[in-house]
């Protein structure tokens, strides 16, 4: 099987099992790197020695993190098991790198305020929404107009991590800015329609089942891109949502301008959301539901970064 056919078969196997697009690109990336690392030999010709050497090189030469190394191993396990249909007892038995326990970076409420003050326009609104709802960045970028319920003060997150839906709150102070933003986006959408464009990508086979749904207002992105693009197979002129790097760059620049030395990213706003809710006395199970964590133990990490000292315990020295 030539390399092009191998990657095509890998993509087909991932889509057949409904893996996310992000996972597909990551797995294709690691398989391509593995093949190049081994001198363009076919994976069928290789075994434990080559896989072990590749993973060791990632850690020793490339200094990748344990989670990145495990991600590469997962991609190779999928390749051998589900694409090449090779027994993977030898591969699944490889020891996975031990992930160190790290405390999440959390901004104080004042630091969040300073960062948001230095952002502008849609990037500021999006960052405020991340902090106010606890959404992941890709979840916020994937919001459609129909997912925002102003009457119920709710936002429905669809197809989040693990392809799970959940409901989170719509912050009261963001309702007015979001309404104005959506009004401007709707005007832009109507102009696109008048010019023969106005389509968006629909999930799954909805675009085939409902031919005109891609032009309906409810399906439009809350944060659409500035420019149109032409969808090759259909020839439709569409808009995608803004690219993740646009928001990440704006946030990184705002953190620097605010004089904050913490290694904060957009995901830090999600960590801050959870920590500040726990500080305010909200039940950890409620926070778990809002974050979409399957296991409360994942949420419990935020109890270790509450602004009350180590593990939230008051030091006996404070009683002297």
Image (tube, rainbow, N blue to C red):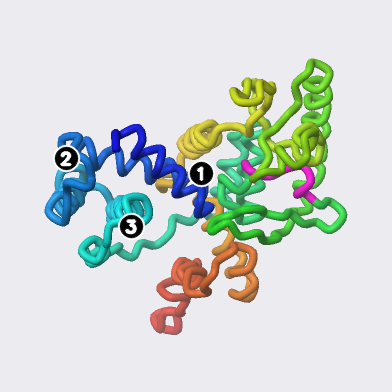
Mark-to-mark CA distance, 1 and 3: 20 Å
Is 47 situated left or right of 184 in this image? left
According to the picture, the residue beneath numbered tag 3 turns out to be 81
Which residue occupies 70% across, 59% down? 168
According to the picture, the residue beneath numbered tag 2 turns out to be 38
According to the picture, the residue beneath numbered tag 1 turns out to be 21
**Of the numbered discs in the image, which one, if any, rests on residue 299?**
none
Q: Name the secondary structure under disc 1.
A: helix
Which residue occupies 66% across, 55% down? 133
Q: Name the secondary structure under disc 3.
A: helix
Q: Residue 291: x percent and y percent?
A: 59, 62
Disc 3 or disc 2, which is closer to the eye?
Answer: 3
Indicate which disc, 3 or 2, sits on the residue closer to the N terminus: 2
Task: Name the image quarter holding the C terminus.
Answer: bottom left
The magenta-colored residue range is 141-148
The answer to whether one can see residue 68 in this image is: no
Q: Residue 178: x percent and y percent?
A: 77, 41
Q: How dense is the environment of label 2, judged by Cα within 10 Å: few (below 14), some, or many (20 and up)?
A: some
Q: How dense is the environment of label 1, judged by Cα within 10 Å: few (below 14), some, or many (20 and up)?
A: few
């Amino acid at each position: 099987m030539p390399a092009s056919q191998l990657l095509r078969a890998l993509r087909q196997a991932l889509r057949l099992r409904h893996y996310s697009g992000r996972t597909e690109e990551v797995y294709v990336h690691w398989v391509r790197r593995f093949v190049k690392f081994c001198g363009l030999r076919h994976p069928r010709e290789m075994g434990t020695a080559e896989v072990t050497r590749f993973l060791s090189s990632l850690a020793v030469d490339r200094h990748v993190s344990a989670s990145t190394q495990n991600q590469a191993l997962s991609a190779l396990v999928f390749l051998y098991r589900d694409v090449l249909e090779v027994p993977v007892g030898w591969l699944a038995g490889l020891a996975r790198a031990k992930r160190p326990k790290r405390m999440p970076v959390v901004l104080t409420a004042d630091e969040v305020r300073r960062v948001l003050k230095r952002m502008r326009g849609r990037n500021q609104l999006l960052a405020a929404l991340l902090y106010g709802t606890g959404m992941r960045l890709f979840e916020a970028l994937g919001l459609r107009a129909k997912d925002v319920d102003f009457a119920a003060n709710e936002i429905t997150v669809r197809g989040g991590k693990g392809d799970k839906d959940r409901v989170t709150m719509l912050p009261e102070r963001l309702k007015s800015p979001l309404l104005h933003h959506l009004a401007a986006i709707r005007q832009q959408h109507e102009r696109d329609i008048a010019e023969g464009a106005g389509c968006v990508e629909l999930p799954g086979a909805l675009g085939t089942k409902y031919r005109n749904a891609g032009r309906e207002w409810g399906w439009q992105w809350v944060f659409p891109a500035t420019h149109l693009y032409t969808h090759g197979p259909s020839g439709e002129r569409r808009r995608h949502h803004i690219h993740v790097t646009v928001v990440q760059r704006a946030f990184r620049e705002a953190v620097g301008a605010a004089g904050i030395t913490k290694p904060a990213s957009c995901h830090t706003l999600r960590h801050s959301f959870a920590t500040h809710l726990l500080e305010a006395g909200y039940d950890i199970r409620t926070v778990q539901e809002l974050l979409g964590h399957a296991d409360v133990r994942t949420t419990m990490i935020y109890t270790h970064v509450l602004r009350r000292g180590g593990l939230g315990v008051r030091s006996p020295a404070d009683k002297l």
